[in-house]
Image (cartoon, rainbow, N blue to C red):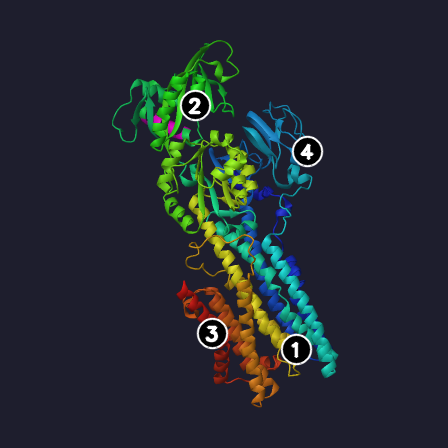
Amino acid sequence: MTEEEAEARRLAEGYNELPAQRKQSSFSIILEVLRQPMLALLLACGAIYFFIGEESDALMLLTFVVVVAGITCYQERKTKRALEALRRLSSPRAIVIRDGVERRVPGRDLVRDDIILLREGDRVPADAVVLAVKNLLVDESLLTGEAGAVRKSARDGKEEITHPGGEDLPFVFSGTMVARGRATAKVTAVGSSTEIGRIGKSLARISEEDTLLQKEVGRLVRNFALVGAILCLLIVIVYGLTRGDWVKGFLSGLTLGMAMLPEEFSVVLLVFLALGAWRISKRKVLTRRTAAIETLGATTVMCVDKTGTLTVNRMRLDGMTVDNEFFDLAAGAGRELVDREKSLLRYAELASDLEPFDPLEKAIKEKSFELLSSAWRLPDGWKLAREYPLSKELVAMSRAWKSSGGEEYAIAAKGAPEAMAELCRLDAGKTDALMREVGKMSARGLRVLGVARSAYKGSELPEDQRGFDFELLGLLGFTDPVRPLVPESVKECYRAGIRIIMITGDYPGTAVFVAREIGLANPGDFITGAELRRLSAVELKRRINDVNIFARVAPEQKLAIVNALKANGEIVAMTGDGVNDAPALKASHIGVAMGERGTDVARETADLVLLNDDFSSIVMAVKMGRRIFDNLKKAMAYIFSVHIPIAGMALLPVLADLPIVLFPVHIAFLELIIDPACSVVFESERSEEGIMDRPPRNLESPLFDRRTFFLSILQGLSVLAVVFCVFLAALWLGMGEIEARTLAFASIVFGNLMLIVTNLSHHHHFIEILRAKNKALFWVLGGTVSFLALVLYLPELRDLFHLSFMHVPDLLLCLLASSAGIIWFEIYKVIGARKA
């Protein structure tokens, strides 16, 4: 199928996605927003104003309902778009043949009649009929509920499509998992036409337990709501008893409720985590679970694969050893290969796929085309008769080639050197000599592969590759260059107090060579997979404190490494790409799957998916995670502190039997500043300098620690004290109720802006923060000042807000007074910077 044909069919039949994945409509978002407590309080206040005959105030509040709802809808829509983009990224991918070329596309882009390739660990992206198969087992428990994978066969043209379940059927179904083998299949149904679509399953509906942050924010909201409800009741009673007006007392109680309601906490958490995940995805790291974002900054150990993560995963055949003599292919490019070396290269190619996908096989084929003439190719007419795959027991594979019209076979084998020693039946002395050569090549940073050949004559081939009499031809050495940014990223991790552990299936010599290149600590000490099997859990827990290299490790052994680190109290990030990596990824605090070479099992188990498989991207994600948590903490501190002067000025005048300062319309105006400030300004703030020069935070440390809690209270009380003093001074100087309210309101607005700016950094002073040019900050500052000017100098708005005309000197006085409320915190930051 061509891309044009696929696009036409996609337009006609739709994307390969279930109805549950459709976007939420704007109308449903608006309905959700209108159910928020703040808007409900605004509507209640508007109804009371209508009841007491103040239609202008009621209309103004309804206008604010529309504006606040609009801002909230915009934030919700932005968040939903970010989550939708992440959902599209995280959908299962498929290997498809389009225009005769093999390519990887999102699963949602598949159409009927697409030819797809399925490999071990892949999730089947659509219903399909199997055209060609090799040892294919598929786990269909998602659809059938039956444990255990079922065997699949190729279609012979007779079978009709059946329901899932049953052995040796040629059909695979969307959402099922390839447990073993590989196949080529033709898509028969997509989207809601698939079996999973017809029975109404939805992979998108996943309920997750609240994270530590969500639980803490929930507690904060409940505590605020409880205190607010008690104070509201107190205000209603005090106002009604002292002033005899229960309706206005109820209105004052609602006003205080609006001032106390911390609905921003939950909104900010959602926005920060969703937009944070979206920002991280732009840096090639997909966040599958937002809980990973709050854990990133607490990471103390990163366990990373060498191949493809620390290195570029583009193997190059750089050396070979034949008869105990090493030949450097890169340094000796001018020398022609001798016959024995040519045989080694020839049989290495015969032991590989004709169209290789594996990096090692690609490197063999490239070098073979470069160095071997046609005389060293397999004669015409020879065909592949059988392939003996790798197994857990023997890490080697063989391919049997049959001559045309005869019973002669040429057998080519390649695999791990120790497996080749077993396959060639080498005695102990020859095996030791072989492993010494392997050690020499590994010390050069080469990944080593053994190659052997055999000849066979007969009508039937042996069932096991051990049935051939193999002759060892030699060793091939491959290099996988270190990614350019890795050494600097490793240094950055060490500065940040993060330990790096390298895990590889390669030999210790290769691992040590790469470790020295990237600057890994203690590169001379390592544990091999064989040693790991012998170590008890207690011994591993002790040894792992000093060892940063694990070589010749099987994927399933990663789980033991993760458990040992967790037992030592470490917060572990683990990378993986295979089916066998899934337990370790799930057990770690942050599972990181490889996006380019990883299986769907690994990606669906992981918390993060590394779209470019680059280690530096993980380090960047940790930095982004620290920045997100820092900014979230600042935003929460700001919300906490700004509610104190607002609630205080709604409460104190009533208790002191003074004129009322804040009405619902004033609270609504302040909400217009608070909402975008805490969810946009703080979210877009850049990270603090030296964010990666401090140790990881304690995962159990609360968002509001004692220091943050007391600083927020002091900030809020300072602004409240200044505003209340301005209000009292105005009354003492003989100003009227409206003039005093105007001065107090302007002081609160300016104090609010001061709190925004000063809380953007707990290290830089006021001027440095403004110089940082946070665009969202200047939009909020400019919009607030402009709106305040309209309220003060447009008579219609001024009357609606129950304010008076204000002279410029009075405005400057309010600005200076509000600055006095936060000047102590600026001095505190300067003193702290000098001590540091």
> For residue 262, which quarter of the picture?
bottom right
Q: Residue at x 55, y 71 (%)?
A: 716
Name which residue type carries label 3. Answer: Ile
Question: Is residue 159 shown left or right of residue 765?
Answer: right
Residue 356 image offset from top left, x and y in percent: 44, 29
Foreground mark, 3 or 4? 3
CA gap, disc 4 to disc 1?
62 Å
Q: Quadrant of residue 602?
A: top right
- Give me the C-alpha separation between circle 3 and circle 1: 36 Å
Which region of the structure is painted magenta?
A: 361-370
Please state which of residues 633 and 404 is positioned toward the viewer in this rendering: 633
Q: Is residue 364 magenta?
A: yes
Query: Which three-letter amino acid code belongs to the residue tagged 1?
Result: Asp
Query: Where 659 sits versus 136, above or below?
Result: below
Q: Which residue is mark 1?
A: 57
Name the secondary structure under disc 4.
helix
Q: Which mark is residue 823?
A: 3
Residue 439 image offset from top left, x and y in percent: 36, 28
Q: Earlier in the sequence, mark 3 or mark 1?
A: 1
- Location of mark 2 (residue): 418
Q: Tell me the SS state at disc 3.
A: helix
State the image coordinates of residue 415 (x, y, percent, origin top left).
44, 24
In the image, what residue type sits under mark 4?
Thr
Q: Is residue 67 above or below residue 514?
A: below
In the image, 98 versus 377, the foreground residue is 377
Q: Is residue 50 visible?
A: no
Chief secondary structure of the magenta portion? helix
Q: Residues within 10 Å of mark 2 (few under 14, many from 20)?
A: many
Question: How packed is label 1: few (under 14 Cα within 10 Å), some, or many (20 or more)?
Answer: many
**Which numbered marker is on residue 320?**
none
